[in-house]
Image (spheres, coloured by chain):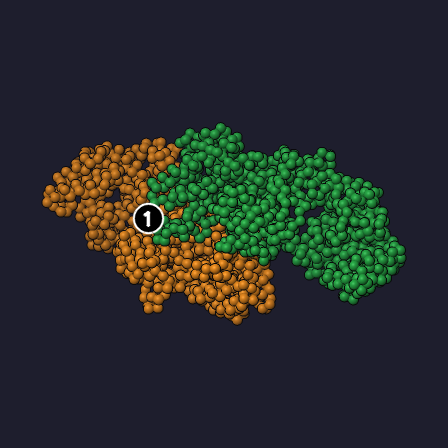
Chain colours: A green, B orange
Amino acid sequence: MSGYVGSRLVSTHAWVLPFADGSAEMRELLGGKGANIAEMIRILGPERVPAGFTITTEACVAYMKRGRVFADGMLEQVSQALSVLEAQSGKRLGAGDDPLLVSVRSGARTSMPGMLDTVLNLGLNDESVEGLALRTANARFAWDSYRRFVQMYGTVVAGIEGARFQEVIAAAKRRRGVSLDVELDLDALREITEDFKRMFAFPLDPREQLERSICAVFDSWLGERAAQYRRINQIPDTWGTAVNVQQMVFGNKGSTSGSGVAFSRDELTGAPAPSGDFLIDAQGEDVVSGTRNTLDLSEMNARMPKAYAELLEILRALEAHFGDMQDTEFTVEEGRLFMLQTRTAQRPAQAAVRFAVDAVEEGLLTRKQAMLTIDAHTLDTLLHPTFDPYARYSVLTRGVGASPGAARGAIVFTAAAAVAAAELGDDVILVRPFTEANDVAGFHAARGIVTAEGGKASHAALIARGLGRPAVTGASELEINLVDEQVRINGTVLNNGDWIAINGSTGEITIDEVPLVPAQVSTHFQTVLGWADQQRTLGVRANADTPEDARKALELGAQGIGLCRTEHMFLGERQPLMAAVILAEDDSARAAAIDALAPLQERDFEEILRTMSGYPVTVRLLDPPLHEFLPRPADLPVGSPERSRVEALQETNPMLGTRGVRLGVLFPELYEMQVRALFSAAARVADATVEVMVPLVAYEGELALARELIDRVAQEQGFSAYTVGTMIELPRACFLADVIAGDADFFSFGTNDLTQTGLGFSRDDIEGRVLARYIEAHIIDRSPFETIDVPGIGQMLRMGARLGRRTKNDLKLGVCGEHGGDPDSIDFFHNSGLDYVSCSPYRVPVARIAGAQAALRAVKDPGPWTIESDRPVLADARANGDRRLAA
Amino acid sequence: MSGYVGSRLVSTHAWVLPFADGSAEMRELLGGKGANIAEMIRILGPERVPAGFTITTEACVAYMKRGRVFADGMLEQVSQALSVLEAQSGKRLGAGDDPLLVSVRSGARTSMPGMLDTVLNLGLNDESVEGLALRTANARFAWDSYRRFVQMYGTVVAGIEGARFQEVIAAAKRRRGVSLDVELDLDALREITEDFKRMFAFPLDPREQLERSICAVFDSWLGERAAQYRRINQIPDTWGTAVNVQQMVFGNKGSTSGSGVAFSRDELTGAPAPSGDFLIDAQGEDVVSGTRNTLDLSEMNARMPKAYAELLEILRALEAHFGDMQDTEFTVEEGRLFMLQTRTAQRPAQAAVRFAVDAVEEGLLTRKQAMLTIDAHTLDTLLHPTFDPYARYSVLTRGVGASPGAARGAIVFTAAAAVAAAELGDDVILVRPFTEANDVAGFHAARGIVTAEGGKASHAALIARGLGRPAVTGASELEINLVDEQVRINGTVLNNGDWIAINGSTGEITIDEVPLVPAQVSTHFQTVLGWADQQRTLGVRANADTPEDARKALELGAQGIGLCRTEHMFLGERQPLMAAVILAEDDSARAAAIDALAPLQERDFEEILRTMSGYPVTVRLLDPPLHEFLPRPADLPVGSPERSRVEALQETNPMLGTRGVRLGVLFPELYEMQVRALFSAAARVADATVEVMVPLVAYEGELALARELIDRVAQEQGFSAYTVGTMIELPRACFLADVIAGDADFFSFGTNDLTQTGLGFSRDDIEGRVLARYIEAHIIDRSPFETIDVPGIGQMLRMGARLGRRTKNDLKLGVCGEHGGDPDSIDFFHNSGLDYVSCSPYRVPVARIAGAQAALRAVKDPGPWTIESDRPVLADARANGDRRLAA
């Protein structure tokens, strides 16, 4: 408990802390809400914030560990805190004269809006309701509050179905012949309340009400709804929630009262004017429940000018104090403004970027501070069209948001149909069970891609992100019938040509006509990117295979190409040539096929190198499994020699088969042709900087052999402006990195394959069903293909990096897996001493910002790698909620 | 050169060393032959061994590095050594009066019989031949020697085809009307010699003869024949060969002269009587060339009793001195015995075992010393029938010796045919392109297995070794036509029912009727195994899935079962039940299918546990890829729901897919059924010791989940005599081993899968063509599936072992991959602090001996694992000739 001792309530455990003793730094212990309430009291003074206390997250953790039993001493501490609250307010819980009423609200470390339970107006019973009526001189208000409390307690604590309460109210209205809630008179409210109390064992003892409500809030953390939210938002189950007990103030005391939510700036655009909603004569729940039509915050100026002016001043003060956009709740009780909570405002990327720029201009934040207010994960959306944020639509089904941006178009079921439609100028969405190499033409032609299988790292997702096409993958509710060209989704049948809209950021699919908003590369965004580049030490390159990709990469700020895959140059119409190389019956047939490929390859290289003149280009020699170049056996005549050769080359586990440098060892002619073409092209381009990369090296001898070949070709061609390096993408290579570095000028960590082999997980086979089940079972909190698995794969990478640098101090280190565009992974790469990341062009801006943020947050250099020295990172893994580490 | 300085010839490099200055310890520098000659001089005195000198292996290495150019100073050192030899012998090379003749022989560190070149009688020319004739008073002998020299020089040094020399001799015989070599008179020999000399530029200068002969011997190291031998026998190319220049003695000086080879004991049986061959009036090459019918060594007693008695005494002395069976060459020149070389005798396993036992009884060796004379790799043959070692047969083709032992039978092409034939009592050999899980019944039925694909770790090899069936895999010259039931091998066509014989130790396939010799589990072998068990600290268990396997394992000395695979219990006739579990449409259908499996599973376990009562049994929960349990999609009706379910479960890379604990996470009912059945069975067996093993753990949370399930079932059943552990077979698990150890009582390293994932090598796909090419390209020296890859996979294992023990000091550590039966790997496992290895029952005796040898050779404890502290093992890797490490 060190660091948190300081309240008189604390003995061995601070299960409970008064708001006045807390602060924003104590978020882990007090939860976000409790910590921020405490901080508000420090800034605004106790008169602006209703008093109360927080039951800590540790109390919740203890409750969970004991099997839903309160920690020893907790209730005593609650009693003490309550006594203090009663003394300060001069009111008493359940008192018949001037009763204290409290709200009991959840408050986890991270906001989980609507997921956890809340009980308002606690403390009312048959006695205190009369006291409240007396003190407020408003019996109807008192009984309406009592009715609300019994109803809320009934649903939240006693677990009664909400509809049963609605039925009682409806019956009372029928009996009286009225139709609105406000038309119910005092008698009616009394009658309803009595009816409610007969529905379950409502405790009249306010202490019992409080204890059971605390239980209910703790229990709501364990509920299915909250658990699911945590899974989606990667919040550890082990955190638990705090509970805030706060004196009630009342917005429902007539026309001088009201409740509202207020953002310190426009929450959708970031424009520097407060925004929000409010209601006269209402409690907070009326504003957020959507049952009443709220007023725009600006109208408050006319209705309650003093409170409005105070609110604006407070919003400015809170923003200045917390250094970020704020999202607040407030209540006006008979003209007096109370702030109930404040938190950092969730906002879309454009608002985040605008706020950052404005905050610096206003002198509110430094550039560095401003940059850290941006959630790098969201920035992708700025580079793609999005659904209109004001649009209303219903979601037909939801898959994985695999490539950001939104698109609309007519459904087609084949790549060929997509190409045909695109030629006619039609917008289409390509819908497939899954996609393969030969579908890529269809990706270009379609506006967006939907697959029923796969995840964020499936083939469809990778290609779509590379091309900047929105994609939804793993939409498992799609039943696609390719024969009838029909897809059935939750009972809705869609045919070829029917229109759908998809949101590749959220995974949503809808048949509603959602308007799209075009990409907004605002000057604000450019400004922030400029700041990031000044701050960043980690280089950002792009993975680009074509001149178009390369141009896009430069436009988005890439500092080179970190991965130019050559295999795409052998697919499509060139596939038969490549098949001929592999299936050649003798050396001369093979040589002829290779000769045919060489000029094409050389032209490819020259265009890319010319585009990237002055920037480094890492060209990876052929990598993919053999079968990608071969016709399918079933397409060849039975018994033909070609078919039997193709069948002989089929592999059980192509991912672990004849690919990468293994192809180069088996068919050195192929690598030689590639290197020759590359150097010939480079020799014709001014300022070409060529890095030749050998993929899938497990043995140091593989790289030695490849390097011999590359150096020999260079010598024969009199070419010298190149370096040679290797992908480090197999666990063995990490262990032998110091030896391998002897033949390498650079390493590029292929974290996709390193993840696959290090975990023994095939991305294609595991990412869907198995990983979903793993996340559900709390074994992992997200896909290791999305964010690098720090304690396992991350350690391998770090080991490889350190060993490599031990041999060559100046060994250049990069990453070219998909993780290179993931902000959390980028943070890890920065702290591991890497020189650059390389990601798909559309992720480059994200990586630029994330790289800068990593530099700003940077921990000190972790020193030479040993399993011991790096083990502290397990603490991070623990924070990420890994099942066993967290236990 | 430290340690080898001591001869006056040495300056900076000892390119040359006189025999008298060498010793047996200098094998690396002098080669085996040179070192042993030097040692013989030390033991027997200079009068028994012709004098000479060794040109060192370092001179050869320098020659290779300079591109076939002698090292600076080497020729000068040769000249000096030659002068000394001339002075000591009182003869001069090339002298016309009393010429010195020398032999020039190769001598690598390891014996490579017949692979490297030799030149005899060097120093003869037109002048010295007359001197030799004069001194020996035997002109015919002198000219015969000259003729032999020119011929040998011509073939070895000048590269003339041997047949051309034979033609000249044949022509001379025709002219003279004679038919035998000995009928050629002096004139004929002169004439032949002159004819030979006209065939190429024969150098008359004896110094030039010597230099060119040294070149030729060095070059022979680089020749294709020697390179291939090294590949097969895993000898590094970088070692080079020494060259021994030795004064000639002559066994061809009439009836008091002769040459022979002598073993100190019977080389086939090990019986304690010298054996060998000899010839009167002949040089050594006549004995070994097979052109003359040799006499048994024992006949020497009658012909040359004094030399024979001396030879016997020398053989005893050499054996005692070297502490091992010796294989010698000798020459008797006019009654005087000269020893030309001695080396450790290569011998079959039964001879090695018998020698070890006899040597101890004779007081020649201690038990420890005796045990180290046995090559553990060969012992397998003692447990299987073998080809009669005296049989002559021609090899039709050669594959990989994948499971030891020999078998004969009629060819069948399907498992079903094998079963049918076995029911009729017929002996059959199952010949398949490759084998699959469903072929296993055929393995039981067949006498032996042949596959065209795969290697030592292919499915066929693993199953065959487990069953003790001989197997030849990867016989790539087989063209198998399953439709016509015909196999074509190098032009020979064999049909269903044709007989073949296979030798699974050597990979040979023949159609000759080779007699088979039954397995010989001699009392000698039992004696040695008993010694080994006393010496051994490493436990030896067996991999056994059936009661029969378990009984066999016990019989062969296993101390428990280290791997009881349960998946075999779900194949065959139970496959439909298992398919029903996986394809169940709802929970109740799944539960019903599982209920049907449970009693079968329980019976399986009970039988095995009863057999192994008192010994530990490690039961691995279900592991293999889903598809192994499923019908093939093609066998199901098109469009049927079952087919579409099966198709949905197809995996691109099953090895990295839904297997192991992933199955357990997806279908916990399956694991629960297995555990319940196991504990129910164990509860009924006295002294059952059950170790439950969870396979394929990557994440600590997987094991935690499985352990929860296992402990819960145990508690429900009131069973407690069990432990829980996991396979460590994924790289991530090695990195997290300390965390994983928190939930494990033991680790069993699954080195097969660890090799596959650590190297990214699919055993099925890579082992054939790719690894062959890798060995050829000197990237590796053997398959990593045969002997563990120490610098890579070995390091991972060691890291996992050390981290695991850091958490639990008493964590039990074992290995259950195929490497558990490989002597070299066993040595590594012993030195890595493992508790036991587990291998197929027929490898158990090998592992027992290899474990004892490892203990005898043991290096000191390597201390806690860090990449630094373990890096010295790279020195071993270097010695093994790994391409880059060796550079």
Q: Toward which corner of the image does residue B425 lie, by quadrant?
A: bottom left
At a point 27% along the width and 48% down the height, the residue shown is B329
The single residue placed furthest to the top in the displayed view is A686
The image shows residue A793, relative to residue A548, as above or below, that is below
Q: Residue furthest front?
A: A424
Between B406 and B481, the one nearer to me in the picture: B481
Q: In the rendered view of the protein, which quadrant contains the C terminus of chain B?
A: top left
Q: Residues within 10 Å of mark 1 (few under 14, many from 20)?
A: many
Q: Which residue is mark 1?
A: B343
For the point 54% across and 63% down, the residue is: B585
The front one of A132 and B2 is: A132
- Identified at 46% across, 35% down, the residue is A605
Q: Amino acid at mark 1?
A: Arg
Regarding residue B99, the answer to whether it shows in the image is no
How far from the left and from the top, in percent, is residue A584? 36, 44
Give percent across and percent down for residue A535. Answer: 63, 35
Q: Find residue A303 and report its horizontal and vertical position in percent.
A: 83, 45
Front-lying residue, A186 or B649: A186
